[in-house]
Amino acid sequence: MSEFKALDGTGAVAEAMRQINPDVVAAYPITPQTAIVQTFSEFVADGLVDTEFITVESEHSALSACVGAAAAGARVMTATSSAGLAFMWEILYVAASNRLPIIMTNVNRALSAPINIHCDHSDSMGARDAGWIHLFCENAQEAYDTVIQAVRIAEHPDVLLPVMVLFDGFITSHAEERVEIFDDAWVKAFVGEYKPKHSLLDLDHPVTYGPLDFTDYYFEHKRQQVEAMRHAQKVILDVADEFAKTFGRKYGLFEMYRLDDAEVAVVVSSSTAGTARAAVDKLRAQGAKVGLLKPRVFRPFPAQEMVAALQHLKAVGVMDRAISFGSMGNAGPLFLELAAAMKIYDAGVPMADFVFGLGGRDIVPSQIEGVFRSLLQIAETGKVSELVSYVGVRE
Amino acid sequence: MATKLNLKELSKREDRLAPGHRLCAGCGAGIVVRQILAAIDEPVVLANATGCLEVSTTIFPYTSWRVPWIHNAFENAASTMSGVETAYRALVKRGKIPEQNVKFIAFGGDGGTYDIGIQALSGALERGHKMMYVCYNNEAYMNTGIQRSSATPLGANTTTSPAGKVIPGKMQPRKDLTAICAAHNIPYVAQASPHNWRDLMEKARKGVAADGPAFLNVLSSCNRGWRHDTSTTVEVMKLATETCVWPLYEVENGVWRLTYKPKVKKPVTEWLEAQGRFRHLFRPENQYMIERIQADVDGKWERLLKLCGEA
Ligand SMILES: Cc1ncc(C[n+]2csc(CCOP(=O)(O)OP(=O)(O)O)c2C)c(N)n1
Ligand code: SF4
Ligand SMILES: [Mg+2]
């Protein structure tokens, strides 16, 4: 059973949170995430959930309280954006290292300065090495579906890692869509009950959370985190399979669109993948063999799988909505990661990076068509004239 | 019935902080924690800010804590405990865990409380979590090597307020955090010191019994930083109270009350002389600092007497 509702991304996430009815939510307002905490506050005020909502005085405290609540055995959620995520930075690592299955929606927004409330991916990309699972969503439906799956992924005993659910500020967070909302009971059954192994509130079995490691143990603890990340990929796929069986929609590590017989492809996540699909269709109609790969799981990065999906191509263009300043060619993080994978697994495909959309700058189909044209040229000549270029900027 | 606060009874209890931790000999922090935990009959869950107490008690794979304990970071013991306490209420409400009269206590050093953690503390107090926050106040960042904090007293020599040729130590008096916490209008706020163990233990009991947040600011000698012999920890702290540098008082539901009044108010020099961190003040050119310190202490004491209805 399900019904269709007109919801924007924040509303869809709030619906998922209402149905999950977590034990504890601690969150702080920031545009464009604010509507999530506001809507959820209404659910609390109206008794639609019986979650304890901690109205913290900052994002640092939001995640700190989440860490405390999760260590106390509660199912815990939060949400943020941009500066809020940056403010949580220190505790992102603490949450992951203590293996606490916290679920956080981060509505992607540019980082200051200059202060800018619109979308880019610099916030979550800056946190990419903190030990969280990162799941990118294209639209409100995916955001809803992914929050539900995230609970199962995070709490899986082989994983026990926090999960970030990511989607584009304003573009996805504030645009209304037709979203399929499942029966409350189905969602409740799907997420099940959280049974923590170690809880601060298990008074008969006192635990020490967050001890001091010297040189003799720290490395092993980090190594265990690697193992958890490795397990995560299978669990993400298993949960996606079960989700498909229950609810009908299928998710994977990434999505491929007209990629099989393509000669060149663009790799782009989140809402821009929708725009890219339109560009693919238009160019296909003109006879160009173009395709799309939309990453969903960014952490753990599915390197081999992506390479397998792309190695038949003659050129691959990554579209990055963030810059890793000072990196090779000042490229974006997605490009750097994928380029390394393509090299390591001997794909032998020329690649270029196209940075776009910083601070919410619009990206339109014609610009993505331009990216495809550059890629077709690379395919033809085998030469990459510009490793990194900027789409839609005034030079 | 609550265990009587007499030493014979209390000494029969198993320590919740086990021996074998790595706090320095004569460190006040261990005394503060043990006294507070011994005063409380109920089960406890603890949070600890980064600092000497934390690093000395949980060196993996060992832990000195026989009760549930969490360290998150330096500045967030209060928000971490907010989460723990909230989780407790949430899980009890949903019947997932039994209701027990658990006491939630956060420990933070003065750095983790007065400075970097003041926002998290203020937020937690304002939200009204039923928890007791204890600042074990050794008046500097000891874990990182005796740097000044806003709890460091006027004139003290620390590694970031060194007694130099032109600047004689810390030039600012301490921030009045106890009053700041009282201004949150929470049910219970107190200042204490373990040299007066009964006073501290009674305050700990009131703190955890309060229907809402409680804050205890507890003096905690660090002989490494204060520069005194490890055997004089208790005497030095006693001098802080006898000179009115560290008055013992409480603010219970808005009512201020001195819980100890020295019979004779000793001059601050007695407290200053007992500690190497003030040695430089006794050079003739720094005489003015001692006068400034005495005037500061006198002014604050007079104000406190008024607040407590004693003057
Ligand atoms: C965000 C952050 N900044 C700085 C530090 C370094 N640091 C660790 S403990 C500490 C001082 C602790 O002082 P205090 O809270 O007074 O506790 P004490 O060690 O004196 O008991 C500092 C500066 C840190 N761990 N985290
Ligand atoms: S340095 Fe000071 S506060 Fe730290 S353990 Fe030693 S005596 Fe205690
Ligand atoms: Mg200190």
Image (tube, coloured by chain):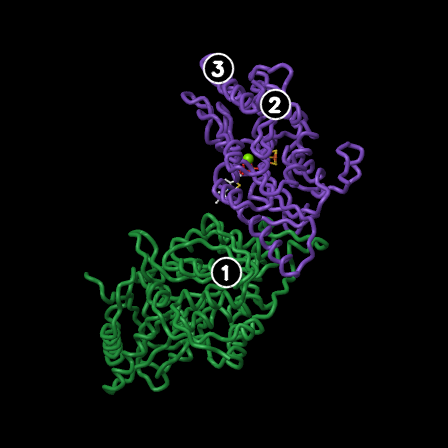
Identify by letter the chain in purple: B
In the rendered structure, find residue B291 and report the number of the disc placed on it.
3
Q: Residues within 10 Å of mark 2 (few under 14, many from 20)?
A: many
Disc 3 is placed on an element classified as helix
For label 3, count other residues whose C-alpha is less than 10 Å away and answer few (under 14), some (14-19) or many (20+): few
To which residue does mark 2 refer? B241
The answer to whether dots 2 and 3 both sit on one chain is: yes
B187 left or right, relative to A274: right
Q: Residue furthest top?
A: B284
- Front-most of B123 and B117? B123
Secondary element type, mark 2? helix
Question: In 3D space, how far apart are the residues under numbered discs 1 and 3 (Cα atoms)?
Answer: 61 Å
Name which residue type carries label 1. Asp
| Identity, as a three-letter code, of the amino acid under mark 2 | Thr
Q: Which mark is first along the chain, 3 or 2?
A: 2
Secondary structure of residue under mark 1? loop
Question: Which residue lies under the disc numbered 1?
Answer: A46
Residue kind at label 3, given as amino acid type:
Glu
Chain holding disc 3: B
* Badge nearest the viewer, 1 or 3: 1
Q: Which chain is green?
A: A
Disc 2 from disc 3: Cα separation? 18 Å
Q: Residue furthest left?
A: A395
Q: Residue lying farthest front?
A: A46
Q: Please indicate whether residue A41 sits to the left or right of residue B131 in the image.
A: left
Residue closest to the eye, A18 or A138: A18
- Say if A139 sits above or below A244 in the image: above
Estimate the x, y position of residue A158 in percent, counting from the top left. 59, 68
Q: Evaluate whether residue A383 shows in this view.
A: no
Vertical relation: B53 (above or below) A389? above
